[in-house]
Amino acid sequence: MEIDPLPNGSGSAAATPAETAATTTAPSPASNTTTASKLSQLTESLKLEHQFLRVPFEHYRKTIRANQRTVEKEVSAVISSVTDVADSNELSKADAVLNLTSLVCRLQGLKRKLEEGSRTENLQAQRCRARLDHLESMDAENLSEWNNVRLKRILVDYMLRMSYYDTAVKLAESSNIQDLVDIDVFQEAKKVIDALRNQEVGPALAWCIDNKSRLKKSKSKFEFHLRLQEFIELVRAENHMRAILYARKHLAPWGATYMKELQRVTATLAFRSNTECAKYKVLFEPKQWDFLVDQFKQEFCRLHGMTLEPLLNIYLQAGLSALKTPYCYQDDCTKEDPLSQESFQKLALPLPYSKQHHSKLVCYITKELMDTENPPQVLPNGYVYSTKALKEMAEKNNGKITCPRTGLVCNYSDLVKAYIS
Amino acid sequence: MELNTIKDAFDRVAKRQKLSCKSQEVVEQVGHEIEQALAKIETTNDPLSPGDLKSILTELKLKLNTSGPLHQLEGLQKENNTNLSKYPKLLDKAFNPDISKAYRNVDFDFHIVNQIIASHFYRQGLFDLGDCLINEAGEPEDIVIRSHFLEMYQILEALKVKNLEPALKWITANREKLMQTGSSLELKLHRLQFMEIVQKGSKADALKYARTYLAPFASLHMNEFLKLVVCIVWVGKLDSCPHAELMAPTRWEDFTEELTQQFCSLVGQSCHSPLSVAIAAGIEALPTLLKLANVMAAKKQEWLAMKHLPVPLELGKEFQFHSIFVCPVSRDQGSEENPPMLMPCLHVLCKQSIMKLSKSSSRSFKCPYCPSEASAGQCRQLHF
C-alpha cells in the first residue's frame, strides 16, 4: 500500500496546483494498470489449465493409436493369409473359395470396427475442442460464472480421484459440464480399482499390458508389484509348488532390476503367512492391496497427463498458504476468513505463513481496505479506523466518535491521519 | 495467451479424420481385390485346372504386395504420429505443465476435506449432492449446518415466488438477535410487501397494511415510514411518485442478498463459501508459488521446511481479512512484541525500528520519512 507522503507544512499552498494536476491525470493510468494486471492475472490462471486440455487429448490419442493398430494388424494378417493360400500347392477350388470368402468377411468386420472407432475419435476430438472453446470463452463479463464452473470442475476431479463416482456424475450432470470433466477416463480406472479392492489383479494386469510401452518408458514398477502380490497370495494359500512355478515365470524376468525386493518376497516361502518376523509379516497384510490401489492411481494419472495430487488439494494448499496469517488463529478472527474455521485451520497447520512487503490495513468497522482514498485515522487512544467509518459515525452522532473496542468517546476533530507506507 | 495457435495445432491433429477415411479406403481396396479374385475363380468354367487357380491366387498375392496397402497405412501413420506428438509439446510450452510443483507433500486429512465440500454443497443449496457425498464417502453428517442452510433455502425459494411468509417467520423468531446487530430486515420486508400492495392499486389495503405493520417502526425510522406512507397518495400513478427508488427493479434481489448475509452471520457462518474463497485465493496465488518453486528447485528441502513464504503473494482486496502492518524500515510484520508506533510527525514505524533509531528513549532522532525529529517517548502504540 502506498499512501502519499506527509506534505511539508509550509509547502501546502504551493503543492495544490501540482496536486490537482496529479488527481486529474492520475486515475486513468491507475485504472489502466489495474485492468492490465487483472488481465495478466487471468492469463496466468489460464496457464494452470494444462491438465484440462491434456487429459482428453491423451484419451483421444489412445483411441487413435488403438484404431491404427487394429487396421495394421488385420490388414497384414489378411495379406499374409492370402500369401499362404497362394503359396500352398495342394488347394482345391472349394478350399480357396472358402478361404478367400472368410477373408472378405474379416475385412468387412474390420470396416465396421473402423467406422465405430472413428465415431469415438470424433466424439473425443469434439471434447478436446469443447475445452479449448471453454478456455477461450473466459472474459471479464462472465468471470464469476466461469469461476463457478472451474470450482465445479475441480470438485469433480477430486471426487473421481477419491472414487466418489456417484457424486461426481451427479455434480457434472446437474451443472451440465460433462464435456469439461473426465468421467469416462476414470471409468477405466474404476474397473481396475474395484478389482484390486476385491483382491483381484486380472484387470490391473490387463491394463499394464495395454500400456506396456509407456509404463516401461517411465520405469514403472507397478506390474512387478502386482506379480509380487499374486505370488504372496499363492504362499498364503500354502500352494507352494504353484508359487515356485509362478515365480519362475513371472518374477524371474524382473530379477535383473529389482533383485532385493524379489529376494525378500520369495523368502516368504520359508516364513509362511503366519510369520511373526516383522519384515515378512507386513507383506501379508491387507494394506498391501491399498498400496497397489494407490500405486495404480499414480500410474494412471501420470499416463493421462494429470497431476498426481487432486487439483482441489493443490489449489486449496496454495490458497491456504496465501491466506494464512498469525491473526487467523486468534479468537476475534472474522468469519469471512476461511481460516477462521477449525477445519481450514487444521488443514493449514503444516503450511507456511504468507508474507507481506507492504502494510495492508483493514478497517475494523467496515472491513474495507484502508488506502489513499479511505485513509486510516487514529483516535487519541491509538486505535485506528477508516476515515469512511469514522465520518459516518460522526455524522450520526453530532461529531462524536465512540471507539467500538474500548468505549472511548472523543470528537471527530481529535483524530489524526496516520501515514503508513 | 495464444489459444489460437493451440487451436490450429489441434486442427492439424484432427485432420486425421481424413486419414482414417483413407485407411478405410485401403481396407476397401484390399477387400475389392480379394472379391475380384473370388469372382474370377467362381466364373471360370468348372473343371478349373490347378494351374489356373494357382495363377489367379498368385496374381492376387502380387497385387496386394505391390500396391502395398501396408506401405500406404504406414505412411498415413507416420504423418499422423508427428502431429500427435507435436500437440502435447505445444501444450507443455504454452501452459504450466505441472502445477503440483509447488505442492508440499503434507497429508491433507481427506475426512476434513470431504466435510468442507459437503458443507459447501449445503451452502449452495445442493442438498442432494451434499448427502450423496456424505453417503459415498461414509462421513458423519453435519446435521446442524445442513438444517441451517435448509431453512435458509426454504426462505429463499419462497422469496423467488414473492412469498415473504417464511422470511417473516424467521425474522420474528430472531427479532432480538437481529436488533442487536442493528438489522432493519423486518422493516425492509414490510416495505417490500407494502409496495406490492401499493402497486396493485388498492388504497384501502395499503392503508390497512401500513397501520398494522408499518406503524410500529414509525418511532425508530420516521423518515422511512413517512416516505412509504406518502406513496399511498400516488396509488395508480406510481410513475410520478417522488420515491421511485422504493420500486427499484432489483429490490427483491437486494432484499434476498441482505437476508442471506444476515442469516449466515446469525448462524455463525461466513456469507461466502469458505471453500470458494480459499480456492479462488489459490488460483491467484499459485502462479507466483510455481515461479518460486522453480527458482528454489535446487533447494527443495528448504522450500518444504519454510515457516514463512519468502515472497509476498499479491491477492485481491476480497481476500484481505486482517490488518497487517509491515514496518517500512525493517520490513518486519507488526506483532504484540513489536507493535506499530505513531511518531509525532504521523509516520508509523515498528517499535524495534524506533528503538534502533533512538538508541535511548530520551534522545531524539530524525524521522526516516520527513525532516522532523522525535524521541521514542513521544511515540504512541497503534491498534488496527
Image (cartoon, rainbow, N blue to C red):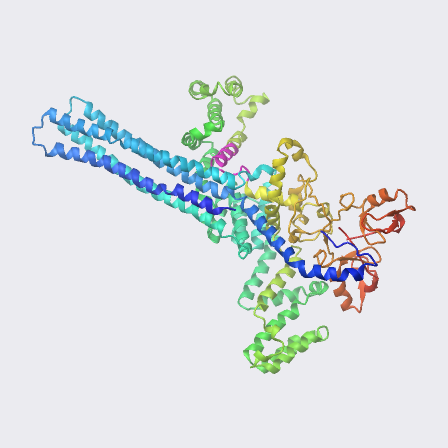
> Can residue B363 be seen by looking at this rendering?
yes
Q: Is residue B144 above or below residue A311?
A: below
A248 with respect to B217 (left or right): left
Estimate the x, y position of residue B4 in percent, counting from the top left: 46, 47
A76 with respect to B233 (left or right): left
Return the residue nearer the eye: B204 or A259. A259
> Can residue A171 be seen by looking at this rendering?
no
Residue positioned 70% across, 75% down in the render: B223
Estimate the x, y position of residue B26 in percent, counting from the top left: 27, 36
Estimate the x, y position of residue A60 in percent, counting from the top left: 41, 40
Residue positioned 64% across, 51% down in the render: B316
Q: Is residue A2 above or below residue B303?
A: below
Estimate the x, y position of residue A220 in percent, counting from the top left: 49, 28
Magenta highlight range: A294-309
Return the residue nearer the eye: A110 or A332. A110
A190 with respect to A33 (left or right): left
* In magenta stretch: residue B14: no
Q: Is residue A305 above or below residue A386?
A: above
* In magenta stretch: residue A305: yes
Residue positioned 20% across, 34% down in the render: B33
B368 with respect to A107 (left or right): right
Return the residue nearer the eye: A329 or A129. A129
